[in-house]
């Protein structure tokens, strides 16, 4: 048997094993009393998590659009970035702004992070990344309106923080034809990995980032056209996390109308992924984020009630990273006629800080004590 044949058979075996592992996964959301049937969830009776609410950047007449917010705590202060544009999202002149805070609740006036884009171009905020002690900010740059389509010249760009100059400077084009969803995370192998979509919404993983900012291996996850043809799955905004045994899970938003998250599994440190399968986890066709906490449980923040769309944000808890068994609504003190979307979460000194966009034109944050989340976790036999 020649080497190419052996490699092919080996790949087939790996994919078969990954698919088998995916089939073994429990229901992604299994609240007490539901048996994994999300139709039994009474969202009106969910526990409510309260916290301290603050505005990072209020509505601005000049740059009315605010979305794609990210948080970081680095060297004694909080950082927040977001996309800022005129009226609607992802049109030319959209750029990335940022603010800082000592406590995560009182924020400085916003400043321009990327600078104004070249004529006819725009930026989308893509997250903070601390690599080898250096503070980086990622942004997707593209031509025209929207990052997806034909002739977009889409690229992922890194900016570095120059502490001496108190300013950001462009460092490198990290990858061509790429927009990530969140900043790279460390695998147990020591490599970095981040999700990537190309200009046609195909999903892959970028693995590397150790030797240099531009050193990445591409691992395909979902071909959008093939997925649409086979299951009407239209992938968007994936997230991933690593379990204690090294298994990687990915949850992917579906724009195809299922109002569910899709899941994919990797058992070889991200080198191959199972074909994404629909989960029972409800999603209002919006972005989500997940974080492993210092208390040993994982949280997932999303718009989990399709009946109300983005008018509510929810926090779920998982003990093992495979199944989420608690769900609560975040109590955000805003008028009823509003929407909350695109959460990002960090943990700092016993609290979760959850950034999100209100109506796509205000950047806000909610500080929730981890002790309150833990109390929700410890309840038994309640919905």
Image: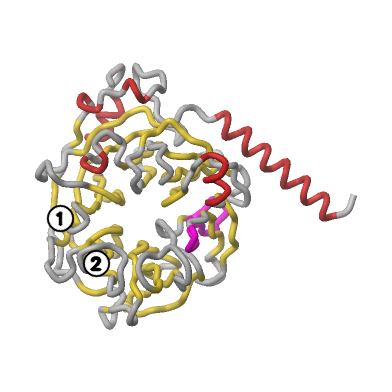
Where is the C terminus found, in terms of image quarters?
top left
Q: Is residue 148 magenta?
A: no
Find numbered disc 2 in the image and state the secondary structure of the residue it sits on.
Answer: strand
Q: Name the image quarter holding residue 218.
A: bottom right
382 lies left or right of 51: right
Disc 1, disc 2: CB below 8 Å? no
The residue that label 2 is drawn on is: 84
Spot occupied by residue 60 in the image (x, y as percentages of width and height):
13, 66
The residue that label 1 is drawn on is: 105
Q: Where does the magenta region start and end?
A: 186-200
Look at discs 1 and 2 and give the one toward the viewer: 2
Disc 1 to disc 2, how far (Cα)? 20 Å
Residue at 34 percent across and 66 percent down: it is: 124
- Residue 49 visible in this rendered orientation of the protein: yes
Work out whether 337 lies above or below 130: above
- Residue 346 visible in this rendered orientation of the protein: no
Q: Farthest right residue?
A: 1
Residue at 17 percent across and 57 percent down: it is: 362
Work out whether 23 lies above or below 337: above
Spot occupied by residue 253 in the image (x, y as percentages of width and height):
41, 45
368 lies left or right of 179: left
Q: Name the image quarter holding residue 298.
A: top left
Work out whether 207 lies above or below 381: below
Find numbered disc 1 in the image and state the secondary structure of the residue it sits on.
Answer: loop
Tell which of 332 and 306 is nearer to you.
Answer: 306
Residue 237: give its label. Answer: none
Residue at 51 percent across and 59 percent down: it is: 192
Q: Name the image quarter holding residue 138.
A: bottom left
């Amino acid at each position: 048997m020649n080497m190419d044949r052996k490699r092919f058979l080996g790949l087939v075996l790996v994919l078969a094993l990954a698919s088998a592992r995916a089939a073994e996964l429990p229901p992604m959301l299994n609240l007490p009393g539901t048996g994994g049937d999300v139709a039994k969830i009474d969202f009106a009776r969910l526990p409510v998590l309260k916290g301290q609410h603050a505005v990072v950047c209020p509505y601005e007449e000049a740059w009315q659009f605010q979305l794609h917010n990210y948080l970081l705590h680095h060297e004694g202060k909080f950082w927040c970035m977001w996309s800022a544009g005129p009226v609607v999202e992802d049109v030319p002149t959209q750029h990335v702004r940022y603010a800082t805070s000592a406590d995560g609740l009182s924020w400085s006036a916003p400043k321009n992070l990327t600078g104004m884009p070249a004529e006819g171009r725009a930026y989308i905020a893509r997250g903070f990344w601390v690599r080898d002690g250096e503070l980086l900010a990622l942004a997707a740059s593209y031509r025209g309106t929207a990052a997806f389509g034909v002739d977009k010249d889409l690229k992922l760009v890194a900016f570095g923080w120059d502490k001496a100059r108190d300013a950001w400077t462009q460092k490198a084009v990290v990858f061509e034809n790429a927009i990530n969803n969140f900043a790279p995370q460390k695998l147990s192998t020591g490599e970095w990995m981040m999700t990537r979509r190309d200009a046609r919404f195909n999903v892959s993983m970028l693995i590397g980032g150790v030797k240099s900012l531009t050193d990445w291996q591409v691992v395909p996850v979902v071909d959008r056209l093939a997925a649409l043809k086979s299951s009407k799955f239209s992938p968007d905004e994936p997230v991933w996390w690593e379990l204690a045994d090294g298994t990687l899970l990915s949850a992917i938003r579906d724009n195809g109308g299922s109002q569910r998250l899709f899941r994919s599994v990797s058992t070889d440190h991200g080198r191959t992924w199972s074909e994404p399968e629909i989960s029972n986890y409800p999603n209002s066709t919006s972005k989500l984020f997940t974080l492993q906490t210092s208390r040993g449980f994982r949280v997932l923040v999303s718009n989990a009630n399709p009946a109300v769309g983005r008018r509510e944000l929810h926090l779920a808890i998982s003990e093992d990273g495979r199944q989420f068994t608690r769900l609560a609504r975040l109590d955000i003190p805003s008028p009823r006629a509003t929407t909350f979307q695109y959460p990002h979460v960090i943990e700092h000194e016993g609290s979760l800080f959850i950034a999100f966009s209100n109506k796509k034109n205000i950047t806000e944050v909610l500080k929730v004590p981890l002790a309150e989340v833990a109390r929700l976790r410890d309840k038994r036999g309640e919905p």
